[in-house]
């Protein structure tokens, strides 16, 4: 199975907001909490490094990590535009124990699917509490990528 794309073709929306510290704080768990984009980036990078025997898997993990890194940048920019500071941590500072260090590809692919599903649920809950339409649209756009990642992980899981 050749996987060539890791993100939706749709553009990401431009963020148009006024300062709102309370809304910036709503984005922090997705930005750099324990189940965040930052955690996904570092988890998928780690997993790509330990799977050299499975080059397609390693390539897909790194491709998805790059998309997650872009999500991290978009959320960090939105947080700052809302008047917050995009520090690496939500209720607590981010740390390396948040990443998934499972070594078995079958197990970590299953866990990645669950993590992506949890991220989508978190984004959907966050959208309900936001007032700026452009930020809601950003999260809805990120969800499209996360749904694609779930499909890719499920396809890869079939190989194991």
Image (spheres, grey):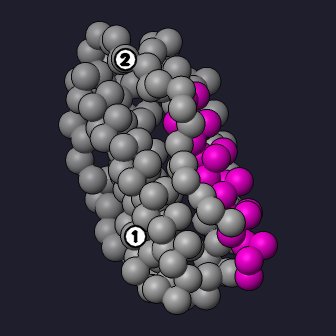
Relative to residue 147, is residue 26 depicted above or below? above
Residue 118: give x, y in percent of width and height. Answer: 64, 52
Residue 145: give x, y in percent of width and height. Answer: 57, 42
> Who's the residue at 66% across and 45% down the image?
147
**In this orientation, which residue lies closer to the viewer: 92 or 88?**
88
Mark 1: which secondary structure? helix
**Residue 152 in view in this figure:** yes
Relative to residue 73, is residue 105 depicted above or below? below
Q: Which mark is residue 45?
A: 1
The quadrant of the picture occupied by the N terminus is bottom right
Residue topped by disc 2: 14
Which numbered disc, 2 or 1, marks the residue that appears first in the sequence? 2
Residue 25: give x, y in percent of width and height. Answer: 37, 34
> Who's the residue at 40% across and 80% down the image?
49
| Residue at the extreme right | 158
How many numbered badges does the structure rendering display? 2
**In this orientation, which residue lies closer to the viewer: 28 or 119?**
119
| Residue at the extreme front | 2
Q: What stretch is highlighted in magenta?
A: 140-160
């Amino acid at each position: 199975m050749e996987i060539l794309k890791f993100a939706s073709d749709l553009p990401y929306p431009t963020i148009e907001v006024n300062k709102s510290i309370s809304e910036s704080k709503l984005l922090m768990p997705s930005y750099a909490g324990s189940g965040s984009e930052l955690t996904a980036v570092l988890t998928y990078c780690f997993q790509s490094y330990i799977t050299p025997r499975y080059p397609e898997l390693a390539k897909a993990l790194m491709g998805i990590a790059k998309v997650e890194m872009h999500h991290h940048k978009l959320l960090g920019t939105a947080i700052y535009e809302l008047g917050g500071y995009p520090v690496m941590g939500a209720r607590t500072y981010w740390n390396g124990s948040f990443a998934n260090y499972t070594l078995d590809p079958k197990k970590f692919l299953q866990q990645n699917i669950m993590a992506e599903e949890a991220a989508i649920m978190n984004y959907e809950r966050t959208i309900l509490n936001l007032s700026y339409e452009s930020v809601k649209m950003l999260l809805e756009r990120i969800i499209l990528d996360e749904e694609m990642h779930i499909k890719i992980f499920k396809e890869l899981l079939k190989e194991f």
